[in-house]
Structures are given as structure tokens and as C-alpha cells.
């Protein structure tokens, strides 16, 4: 296709949302001329399903739940007045709590003000807040935000070291919809101990966002925490960033949550349009379908040409992969659906994996994210008549062209800037595209049965560790090899797990387990010291 033909295709298919200044260009996707006609029926079904979802249908049949993230930015559209009120009350509570914190009306016992936020959460209870904090944060933020988003002890130590003496001015926000996620529980317990070690009362420094009467909710009551904000079963973790999960940390940081909500609301209005060519979420879902043949055959590479959007691919990884990566379809047929998502930021990626994108295996489609505004204010010229931002544009257009020349497909999303409004709009755009795509491939986008298997298996490992430790203590004088130990604790087939547990125990001082090298690695004897 010549550049001229591409230009004509660009003009023909460009889809824009005036209210947020966003455009989606699909001209470099090689769909056939009759593609949209062929997809008209399936897309009608997707629009119907979305309409029913927004009206409160049980759109998550396996968990028998409504799916209501769209009501978070348009509470008046919720199917029950009680939900409308809860959403409105929660946004008001977030605002007034953050205002109280900023004004020092809610203050730490041993300092004048809270100046830091430590957010403890994982998955949807961290990824959205991390994206928002990084995309919109500035040196002028009201509070600085830190994260515990894993059960990695060293990761937590590193954050605590950064906080240092400022822990006395730190408000910890524990976020867990279920209130029972172990990584988050561990982060909370570790944070609590860090406060205690500094003679600080954790409850006076802590708030939670969680479901009513969850394990976490009960813990907050026992510990007399400052406040608890609600999470509802009709909001999924990966679509919760515009609930208290994302709004509370954002408002504490001093960010424009009204702008985020308004951007999402505007995008929702635009993506209710039933003409797929004028609806960027429908168009995007159709492009995903086209690229991967409705089977996820191609990976989604997210290439934002803006440092502030670097975490977008991590955020989308959960939104897309946890939603679409499903073994069975809605009829119970094994389909193994999904779309793999990865990416970092342009033009940095040019110096990392773009080599493979252009010349290696053609198993992806790219989504370029172009941001028109370079920075606040004018730029210096790094060469006559050329700025750093001009280079960024040059590299984006150059890479896109180079990929196209080699038959690599791409879409381009263009936004005027990285602001609360555009970020809210981008989030809403992808949420709805995921919903549409799920109907196109007939799967439930709103559950995550696959995650449970790993959680259960981890529980079995920890149970085994308890037995191993008990046995080591009982047989203090006598060391055990992994083989002996596995048999002794009645799990001979789990010998590899036992071996890994013993190696880990001996590598750390906590449990006092020592290793005595044998003739080879597997003859190593482990003993309680
Ligand atoms: O908010 P919670 O309940 O702690 O869950 C955290 C994350 O864990 C998951 O359930 C997956 O295990 C995600 O869907 C969710 O975002």
C-alpha cells in the first residue's frame, strides 16, 4: 500500500472522541474490505450484552454477580437507587477524608501532618493506583505515594528504608476487595510491625478499602483504624481504579479525581455508540479479533511514546489477560482464549525489543500511544528547529513505518496530553473494549477461576513447610535429606517441593535451619540448629 493510499485509509477509518480529544487510527491493520460487514452480527450481540450489563444483568454468570464499573462514573445509571447512593457517598467520603488529611484535621499522633501514603495491595488493588500515581504525579503533589504490592520481604524493606523516619507521617492504605489476599495481609502485618518498632500506633495510621465484613474489615475494627471505604462485589479488582481503590490514593496525592471520572464518563458515552466505526472501543475490540483471528493468535504490544504511561502495559496486562484468558467459553466448551499483552515505552523499546518486532517472529500487533503535548511550556531546541519532543514523534512515526514495511500491523491512539481526563478516558476505553471482545469470543470476562489453582497450591506448600519444620525440630540431632524428609512427612511424591522448602529455609536465618553438604547437591542434609 502506498503512502497516499494509507492516508486515504487513515481519513476513512479515523475514529475520534471529541470530548476527550482522543483518536484511534486503524489504517495500518490489514483487515479485508468486508470485515466490518462480516462482523456486524457478532458486534450487535456485543452491544446488546453491554447494554444489558449496564442495566444490571448478571453479566458474571459463574459468580452470579452484576458488573458495575460503569456506574462508578455515572452513578445515576445504576440499576438500584441504593447503589447510586453508595457510589456517591463513597466519592464524597474520599474527598472529605483526603481534605481532612491535607488540612491536618486527620493527623498522625506523633507528627503534624500525614505527608506520605503507603499503599498495600496487589493485582487490581495496586496496578490502577500505581498507573495513576505515576502518570499524573508531580513534584508538587500533596502526598508522596509508596507501594507494597508483593510478599517479597526485601521489596518491603526497600520501601520502608525510603520512608525512614517519615513513617511517623505516613498513612497506610490497605486495599483488598476480598480482604483475604495473603500477599496483602503479609504486607499489612509487616507494615504494622514497622510502625510498632518505631513506637507508633498502627491503627492511628491506617485506613482500608475492602468488602463489608471481610477478614480485613474485621481486622480494621479490632485495631480501631481511622476509616474504612467500601468495595462492592459488583466491581471487579481489575476494573476498580475508579472506585475508592484508585480514587482514595489519587485524591490523597492531590490528583484531580473529578477529571478522571469525567474523562471515563465521556468515553463511556462515546463507546455506547452502536456504529462500530464511530466507537473506538468497538473498533479496537474488532481489531483485536481481526489480528488474532478471534483466537488470540497475536500478542498485543503496547507502545506509549510518553514516560508517564510506562505502567499502562502492566495495568492492561491484568485488565486484558485476567479478563480474556479463559479455558472455557460461556457454553462450557474448552477454548483456551486470551491475548498476551506486553510493552514498556517508546522510544526506549526501540533499543530493546523492537528489533524482534520488525524482523523476528510476526506474532503481534502493536498499539502506539501518541501524546501530542510534549511538556508544560516551551522546549529548548536540541538541534536547530528540533526539540527532544520532535525526536520522540520522529521515532514513533519511524518505528511505525518500519514495522508496516515489514507487514507488521499496528493501531495508533492519539491523546492531547496525559491528564486526569485522558487517563480516565483511556481506562474506560480499554475496559469497554475488553467487554466487547469477550462477547465476540463468547467468554466471561469478569471472573478469574484460574488464579485460584495457584493460591491453593501455595497453601499446600506452606502446610508442607510446617510439617518439615516440626520434624526438623523433633529430630534435632539427626539431619535429613530431602528424600528422607519427604517420606517422613508422608509426602514422598512431593520430594521436589520439600527440597525447595529445605533450601529456602537454610538460606535464611529465621528458622535456624542449617545445611550440611553431601556428596552431591541432593545428598545435602538439613538440620534444625
Ligand atoms: O483486592 P483483592 O481481593 O486483594 O484481590 C487482588 C487481586 O487478586 C485477584 O483476585 C487475583 O488473585 C485479582 O483479580 C485481584 O485484583
Image (cartoon, helix red, strand yellow):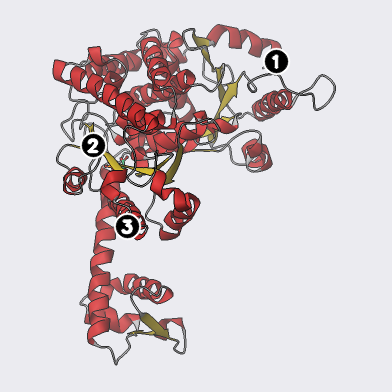
Q: Residue at x 29, y 47 (%)?
A: 451
Q: Give the Cα distance between marks 2 and 3.
A: 21 Å
Q: In the rendered image, which residue does mark 3 sit on?
A: 196
- Judge left or right: residue 79 versus residue 363: left
Q: Are marks 3 and 1 in contact (CB under 8 Å)?
A: no
Q: Earlier in the sequence, mark 2 or mark 1?
A: 1
Which quadrant of the view contains residue 217? Answer: top left
Instruction: State left or right for residue 52 relative to residue 432.
Output: left
Q: Observer-nearest residue: 159 or 524?
A: 159
Of the two numbered discs 2 and 3 on the same chain, state the one appearing first in sequence.
Answer: 3
Looking at the picture, tell me which residue is in the foreground, 136 or 79. 136
Mark 2 vs mark 1: in front: 2
Q: Which mark is residue 2?
A: 1
Q: CA distance from mark 3 to mark 1?
A: 67 Å
> Cβ of disc 3 within 8 Å of ligand 1?
no
Residue that carries the numbered disc 2 in the rendered image = 228
Amino acid at each position: 500500500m502506498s503512502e497516499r493510499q494509507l492516508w486515504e485509509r487513515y481519513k476513512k477509518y479515523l475514529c475520534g472522541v471529541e470530548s476527550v480529544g482522543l483518536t484511534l487510527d486503524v489504517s495500518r491493520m490489514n483487515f479485508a474490505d468486508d470485515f466490518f460487514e462480516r462482523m456486524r452480527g457478532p458486534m450487535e450481540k456485543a452491544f446488546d450484552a453491554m447494554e444489558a450489563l449496564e442495566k444490571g444483568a448478571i453479566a458474571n454468570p459463574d459468580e452470579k454477580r452484576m458488573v458495575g464499573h460503569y456506574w462508578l462514573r455515572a452513578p445515576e445509571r445504576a440499576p438500584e437507587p441504593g447503589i447510586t447512593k453508595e457510589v456517591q457517598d463513597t466519592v464524597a467520603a474520599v474527598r472529605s477524608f483526603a481534605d481532612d488529611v491535607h488540612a491536618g484535621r486527620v493527623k498522625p499522633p506523633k507528627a503534624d501532618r500525614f505527608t506520605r501514603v503507603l499503599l498495600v495491595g496487589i493485582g487490581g488493588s495496586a496496578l490502577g493506583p500505581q498507573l495513576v500515581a505515576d502518570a499524573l504525579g508531580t513534584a508538587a503533589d500533596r502526598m508522596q505515594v509508596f507501594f507494597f504490592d508483593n510478599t517479597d520481604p526485601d521489596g518491603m524493606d526497600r520501601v520502608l528504608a525510603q520512608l525512614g523516619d517519615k513513617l511517623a507521617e505516613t498513612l497506610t492504605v490497605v486495599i483488598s476487595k476480598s480482604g483475604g489476599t495473603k500477599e496483602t495481609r503479609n504486607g499489612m502485618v509487616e507494615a504494622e510491625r514497622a510502625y510498632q518498632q518505631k513506637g507508633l500506633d498502627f491503627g492511628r495510621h491506617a485506613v482500608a478499602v475492602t468488602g463489608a465484613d471481610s477478614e480485613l474489615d474485621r481486622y480494621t475494627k479490632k485495631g480501631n483504624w481511622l476509616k474504612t471505604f467500601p468495595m462492592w462485589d459488583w466491581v471487579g479488582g481489575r476494573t476498580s481504579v475508579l472506585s475508592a481503590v484508585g480514587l482514595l490514593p489519587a485524591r490523597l496525592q492531590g490528583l484531580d479525581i473529578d477529571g478522571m471520572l469525567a474523562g471515563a464518563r465521556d468515553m463511556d458515552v462515546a463507546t455506547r455508540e452502536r456504529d462500530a466505526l464511530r466507537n473506538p472501543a468497538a473498533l479496537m475490540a474488532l481489531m483485536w479479533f481481526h489480528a488474532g483471528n478471534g483466537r488470540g493468535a497475536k500478542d498485543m504490544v503496547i507502545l506509549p511514546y510518553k514516560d508517564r504511561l510506562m505502567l499502562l502495559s502492566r495495568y492492561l496486562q491484568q485488565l486484558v489477560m485476567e479478563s480474556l484468558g479463559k479455558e472455557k467459553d460461556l457454553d462450557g466448551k474448552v477454548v483456551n482464549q486470551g491475548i498476551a499483552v506486553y510493552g514498556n515505552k517508546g522510544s526506549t523499546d526501540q533499543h530493546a525489543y523492537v528489533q524482534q518486532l520488525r524482523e523476528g517472529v510476526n506474532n503481534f500487533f502493536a498499539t502506539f500511544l501518541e501524546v501530542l503535548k510534549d511538556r508544560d511550556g516551551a522546549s529548548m531546541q536540541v538541534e536547530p528547529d528540533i526539540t527532544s519532543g520532535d525526536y520522540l514523534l520522529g521515532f514513533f512515526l519511524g518505528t511505525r513505518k518500519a514495522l508496516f514495511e515489514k507487514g507488521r500491523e499496528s493501531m495508533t491512539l492519539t491523546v492531547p496530553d496525559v491528564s486526569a481526563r485522558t487517563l480516565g478516558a483511556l481506562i474506560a476505553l480499554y475496559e469497554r473494549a475488553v467487554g466487547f471482545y469477550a462477547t465476540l469470543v463468547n467468554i466471561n470476562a469478569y471472573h478469574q477461576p484460574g488464579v485460584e489453582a495457584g493460591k491453593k497450591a501455595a497453601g499446600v506448600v506452606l502446610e508442607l513447610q510446617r510439617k518439615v519444620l516440626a520434624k526438623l525440630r523433633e529430630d534435632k540431632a539427626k539431619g535429613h535429606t530431602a528424600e528422607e524428609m519427604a517420606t517422613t512427612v508422608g509426602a514422598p511424591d512431593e520430594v521436589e517441593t520439600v527440597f525447595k522448602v529445605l533450601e529456602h529455609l537454610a538460606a535464611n536465618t529465621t528458622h535456624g535451619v542449617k545445611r550440611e553438604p553431601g556428596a552431591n547437591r541432593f545428598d545435602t542434609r538439613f538440620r534444625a540448629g
